[in-house]
Image (cartoon, grey):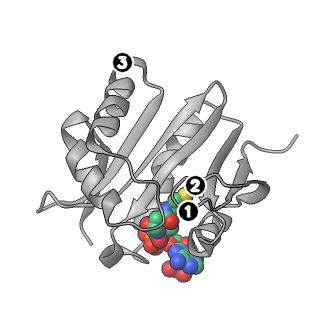
Amino acid sequence: MDVHFQAMTVADAPHIAQLLSMLDETSDWGVEDLRTSLMEERLRGTVVYRGAEQNDKQELLGFIYWRSIVDEVEILNLGVAKSWRRQEIGRRLMDELFSFTKSIQAKRVFLEVRESNTGAQDFYRKFGFVPCGLRSGYYVDSQEAAMLMSLALGAPI
Ligand SMILES: CC(C)(COP(=O)(O)OP(=O)(O)OC[C@H]1O[C@@H](n2cnc3c(N)ncnc32)[C@H](O)[C@@H]1OP(=O)(O)O)[C@@H](O)C(=O)NCCC(=O)NCCS
């Protein structure tokens, strides 16, 4: 499979919004929110977006974005198009994240995931993430709780 991974720019906001609108499990961000966030990356480097595209087409197959807060990194969203799942795109997007955490010597990665989203939870567990809390009523659309998961980085002393 010929997929490449690259930084996303403000011009990609409509493609990310379109893919997001097709994923039931994620929080839906509108184009304007995405544009603002992508602009923030350009200005301050705090929010980082990576996308997966087929080499011969412009179709966005998946994306991840995260923000760094000193030596911690929070995954804000991650999604792979339904027809492209279980083909290691998610894992390779996580590789992009781990290159970044290494480059800034991050100590911890954390995220929120819907309590009912056991598929994504299993995916994150594969990388060593463990549940570390619950936020009741976190998702405004369904009042569903968010499970907090975190991963400690760096070699133990
Ligand atoms: C979670 C998600 C990003 C995984 O992407 P993906 O490209 O399908 O994942 P990969 O192919 O890289 O999977 C790697 C491994 O993770 C595990 N995994 C992935 N999806 C899984 C699922 N639905 N159920 C159980 N385990 C899963 C498997 O062990 C898999 O390896 P295998 O296929 O050899 O068994 C994708 O299912 C998705 O976009 N879900 C909807 C959006 C979402 O839930 N995002 C998370 C928001 S916090």
Q: Nearer the viewer, residue 74 or 128?
A: 74
Query: Hey, what amino acid is under mark 2?
Result: Tyr
Query: Considering the image in quadrants, where does the C terminus appear?
Result: top right
Q: CA distance from mark 1 to mark 3?
A: 34 Å
Residue 20 occupies quadrant: bottom left
Tell me the residue at 73%/42% (across/down).
154
Q: How many marks?
A: 3
The dot on residue 66 is none
User: In this figure, which residue is indicated by the disc labeled 2?
Assistant: 139
Answer whether residue 124 is visible to the viewer in this image: yes
Residue 64: where, in percent of width, then height? 43, 50
Q: Is mark 2 within 8 Å of ligand 1?
A: no
- Which residue type does callout 1 highlight? Ser
Determine which quarter of the picture holds residue 73: top right
2 vs 3, front mark:
2
Q: Residue at x 33, y 29 (%)?
A: 36
Q: Are marks 2 and 1 in contact (CB under 8 Å)?
A: yes
Vertically, is 80 above or below 43? below
Secondary element under disc 1, as helix, strand or loop, is loop
Residue 43 tag number: 3
Residue 82, percent across and down? Answer: 35, 75
Secondary structure, mark 2, is: loop
- In the picture as drawn, the residue positioned furthest to the left comes out as 56
Q: Residue furthest top?
A: 43
| 25 vs 70: above or below | below
Q: Does label 1 or label 3 sit earlier along the sequence?
A: 3
Secondary structure category for the residue under label 3: helix
Residue labelled with disc 1: 142
Write the residue at 71% across / 36% down: 107
Q: Which tag is nearer the camera, tag 1 or tag 3?
A: 1
Along the viewing direction, whichever of 120 and 91 lies nearer the viewer: 120
